[in-house]
Amino acid sequence: MTSYKRFSFPHVYYYVFVLLSLIAKAQARSLNHSLYSFGDSFGDPGNNNYISTTLKANFPPYGRDFVNKKPTGRFCNGRQVPDFIARNLIAAKYPRAYLDPKLSLADLMSAVGFGSAGTGFDPLTPPINNVIPIPTQLKNFREYRRRLVAAIGEKNTQDKIRRSLIYVTAATNDFILNYFGNSTTRPNMFTIPQYERFLLQRVRQFIQGLLYQGARRIAFSGLPPLGCLPFSITQYSNNARNVLGPRNCVEYLNAVARDFNLKLQNELRTIQNSLNGSKIAYIDFYGPVNDAIYNPHRYGFDQVNRGCCGTGIFEQGPSCNSTTITCPDASRYVFWDAVHFTEKAYSIIFKANLPIIDHIIN
């Protein structure tokens, strides 16, 4: 005769209680915490969809691996770092673009992105593609705060912003599109170390603006290996336009990225030490990406120096479109297009920085 273990109702009640407690905690965390992202295309959820610029990604093949396989304006085949942060640590929803006219109160309470692809800290960078400057993103955040006050009151708004995470990623375009781009304005004005200091002054001003609005938890991303972006290899190295030829990273650009990242870390540390009750931390983009490029098989990558979209050596934005041939499996690629990473690469960046992000939130 088969014997059956007797159900213990006290045990059932206990497990139900634990489950309900976990659900309640998750719901409370979603109500009390939000994610606000600022900066460029590494974190823009689609604000460029609503402005007059050609630098958009709200069409296939962008978003082919995102929710419902729909393009949202993210320059990626799927999720980016803010998406992983939001769904894993903070909110129940992926970040929505602040300029989306369909943004609901529930969206405002969850995760909101203010970033704009193509922007930078240098005021001469956004006009290159007619995108949203960093100070305007901060202005939009102030407007967001007023909307939140109208909905939930000043005290609740203060508490919510204080507990929420600010995620910032910018400065790549300042170097790639501006300083090393076609413009001669900045190189004639600044040496590279001087330009780095100029950008860091803007970084400090931006952080001060966030703090003034009540932000107390800020995660600030450094630069990726600038010389390893497929666009950079094509643009700034010799004989790199041949897809089949050698396409090595441009070391002098990587050296600039490393130097800027060190200075950024020092600046963030200085700001942190001058504050009480705030957490400001550096998010490492360079290390995880560099490791994936030089140790690809550790992560299951086959292609590290060109993107999945088209030839992978120059396509991005409008040149990566529904008529462009793409690779069958983006998870084998570090880069989705010639500038931006695949969802898998962003996942690696997120996981590498998870202890830091969790520390800031908790």
Image (cartoon, rainbow, N blue to C red):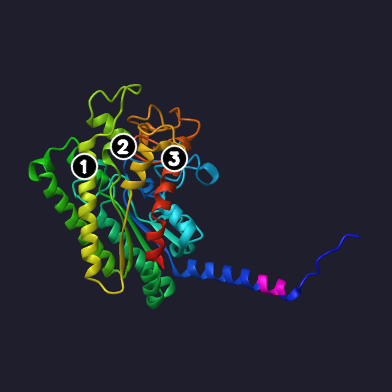
Give how far apart the Cα atoms at labels 2 and 1 are: 14 Å
Query: Residue 100 appears at what percent x and percent y?
Result: 42, 53
Instruction: Report the disc number at residue 255.
Output: 1
Q: Residue at x 28, y 51 (%)?
A: 222
Query: Residue 241 appears at what percent x and percent y?
Result: 29, 24
- Asked whether 310 or 109 is in front, the reply is 310
Instruction: Report the disc number at residue 229.
Output: 2
Question: Mark 2 is on which residue type?
Answer: Leu
Instruction: Report the disc number at residue 298.
Output: 3
Q: Nearer the viewer, mark 3 or mark 1?
A: 3
- Asked whether 217 or 305 is in front, the reply is 305
- Does the magenta-highlighted stretch encompass residue 15? yes
The secondary structure that dominates the magenta segment is helix
The number of numbered badges drawn on the structure is: 3
- Does the magenta-highlighted stretch encompass residue 292? no
Give how far apart the Cα atoms at labels 3 and 1 are: 24 Å
Left or right? Give the position of 24 relative to 192. right
Look at the image and tell me whether residue 249 can be seen.
Answer: yes
Mark 1 closeness class: few <14, some 14–19, many ≥20 residues within 10 Å: some
Mark 3 closeness class: few <14, some 14–19, many ≥20 residues within 10 Å: few
Pick the quarter of the image with the N terminus.
bottom right
Question: Mark 1 is on which residue type?
Answer: Ala
Left or right? Give the position of 287 relative to 122. right
Q: Is residue 174 above or below residue 240?
A: below
Q: Nearer the viewer, mark 2 or mark 3?
A: 3
Q: Earlier in the sequence, mark 2 or mark 3?
A: 2
Which contiguous range is marked in magenta? 11-16
Q: Is residue 51 above or below residue 361?
A: above
Question: Mark 3 is on which residue type?
Answer: Arg
Instruction: Report the disc number at residue 109.
Output: none
Q: Nearer the viewer, mark 2 or mark 1?
A: 1
Local SS, label 3: helix
